[in-house]
Amino acid sequence: MQYLMAIDAGTGSVRAVIFDTLGNQIAVAQKEWVHLEVEGVANSMTFDTKTNWELTLWCIQEALKKAQLQGSDIVAVSATSMREGIVLYDEKGEALWGVANVDARADKEVRYLKEAFEGIEEAFYETSGQTFALGALPRLLWLKNNMPEVYVKVASISMIGDWILAKLSGVIATDPSNGGTTGIFSLKRRDWDVSMAKKVGLKSDIFPSVFETGALMGKVTKKASNETGLSTHTKVVMGGGDVQLGAAGLGVVREGQVAVLGGSFWQQVVNMKSSVIPPKDMGIRVNPHVVEGLSQAEGITFFSGLVMRWFRDAFCDMEKLEAKERGVDTYAVLEEKAALVPLGSHGILPIFSDSMKYGKWYHASPSFINLSIDPEVCNRASMFRSLEENACIVSKINLEKIEAFSALNIEEIVFAGGASKGALWCQILSDVTGCTIKVPKVTEATALGAAMSAGVGAGIYENMVEASETLVEWAKIYTPNVENTVKYAKIKAQWEEVYAHQLALVDRGLTQSMWKAPGV
C-alpha cells in the first residue's frame, strides 16, 4: 500500500495527515500555533517561520509514528494553508518576514493606495477578483515604509503552504488558488500580474513560478529528510489554498457545483469558468480554483462558528452538564431543543455577520433584535435556533449575489464542516436556500484535497477532478420543504432591512462594529 501526506497550515494550528490512496485517513498529528501582534504595530499578526517550522516537523514525525510508517512509505507530500498569509525570502531562499491571513496592519497603506491612485482597487479587482483588504500589495507597501532594511532584501514571495513545500523541496513557487489571494494575479491567465506591483512602486521581480495544483515540484531534499524523517524519494507536489482544496475534498470540481463550508467562518463557494468577470460592485470575492479553467466565487460569513461557540460557552452550562451525563456533544443537546422551536425562532434576529460586501467590508455591532422577556419564547433554545437560521440566511444572500453575476442556477449544495454534523442545521440550510443538501462522509476535506494533489503529482490519479470524483462519498441528503422556503424568504427580507439600520448606527458612531477591513 502507498501513502500520501498532507500538511495543513491553518489559522490556529498545523497538522500532518496521512491517507492511503483510497482516501482513508491513517493518522493525524496536530499542534496549535499562535500569530502574535508586534508591539507597537496595531492589528498585526506575524507568522513566526522559525517556531512554526519546528511545530511542522513535530507533526510530520508524530504522524509517521502514529501510523507506524517509515518516511519511505510516503510516496508524495503536499500542503495547503490559510490563504492571504505570505512569507518573504532573501536571495538565498531564507525566510525574512511573514504574516498570517488576517494581519491588518496596513490600514494606512490601503487608504493611501485608494486615494493616490483613483480607481485602482476597482481596476485590480476586475483582473484579480480581490480587494486590498487582505491583499499583499498594502502589506508589501507597509514593509517598504516601516522596515526598509528588510524590504530591500526581499527576493521572493510565496504563501504559507508554499513555504512548507519550499522547506521540503528547496523550490519556491505558488499555485493559482493560493497565490491568487495576494491580489497581484490574473484570474483569466492564472498567473501573476506584476504590472500591479510596478504601478504602485513596488518590486516586480519577486514573484516566483506558478505551478498548477498537483504539479510535481521535486523531491524531499537531504536536509529536509534529516529534519522530517521523510525519504529523499518522497515526491513534493504543489498544493493550494485551504478553501479550494477543501472544495476538491468535497467533490466540488466542476462548473456550477457549490459548497457551503460551515466552520469558524462560513464560506459559500461556487465554481465558474475562469473567463467570468467579477461583479462591478466588488461585492463577492473571486479566486482561482485548484482545477484548471475554473474560478470560484466566494461569499464569506464572519464568525458563524465562533459565535456558536461563544453562545455555548457563555450561556449553556446546563446543556454542557446534560451532554456530559449523556455522553454526547453539547451542540447535539442544543439542536434537540432548538428543533422544538417554531420556524423563525419567535422573531429573534441575530445581528452578527453581514452578507458579503467585499468592496466595503464591515459589520454592525453584535446583538440580538426582537428578544422577549417571556422565558417560554426567548430562551437558549430559541436563540440557538435563530443563530442557525441566520447563518443559513446570510449564506442564501451571498449565493444569490453569485447567481446574479455568474448566470448560474444553484439547485444543489454540498455542506461540510462542523456545522454539517447537525441534522437540524442541514435541514434549515435546505429550507432557506430551497436546494438539495448533500453531506459528504469525509470529515477532513481540506487535508483530503491536499492528499489528492499529492496523489496527482505521484501519478496515482490523472488529475484533481478524477481524484475528487473517485474518493468522495456521501453520508446524508436533505431536501427542502417548499412552504418553509417561502417563510424564510420573508424573514430574510426583514433581516436585511434591520441589518441596514444597525450598520447605520455604526456609521453614526453610536455602536461599535464587530469587524472592519483595513482602510474602511
Image (spheres, rainbow, N blue to C red):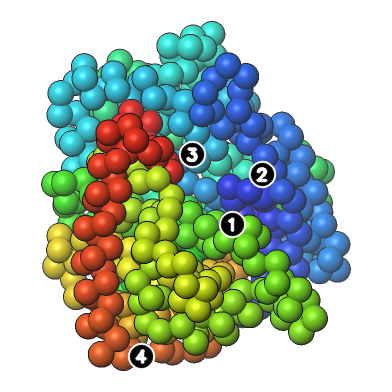
Image quarter in which the N terminus is found: bottom right
Which residue bears the numbered disc 4? 479
State the residue at coordinates (57%, 25%).
97
Q: Horizontal and vertical percent for residue 17?
A: 69, 63
Q: How far is disc 1 from disc 3 in space, using C-alphas?
A: 20 Å
Name the kind of residue labelled 4 in the image. Answer: Thr
**Label 2 vs label 4, nearer the camera:** 4
Near mark 4 (Cα within 10 A), the count class, few <14, some 14-19 or many ≥20, is some
State the residue at coordinates (49%, 87%).
340
Name the kind of residue labelled 3 in the image. Answer: Val
Vertical arrangement, residue 406 with respect to residue 145, above or below: below
* Residue 380 seen: yes
Name the kind of residue labelled 2 in the image. Answer: Leu
413 displayed left or right of 19:
left
Sequence-wise first label, 1 or 3: 3
**Label 1 vs label 4, nearer the camera:** 1
Q: How far is disc 4 from disc 3 in space, using C-alphas?
A: 36 Å
Circle count: 4
Q: How far is disc 1 from disc 4 in space, using C-alphas?
A: 30 Å
Q: Horizontal and vertical percent for residue 87?
A: 54, 32
Helix, strand or loop for disc 2:
helix
Helix, strand or loop for disc 1:
helix
Point out which mark residue 310 bears. 1
Q: Are dots 4 and 3 in contact, CB under 8 Å?
A: no
**Quarter of the image holding residue 464?**
bottom left
Sequence-wise first label, 2 or 3: 3
Q: How far is disc 1 from disc 2 in space, using C-alphas?
A: 38 Å
Q: Horizontal and vertical percent for residue 138?
A: 37, 25
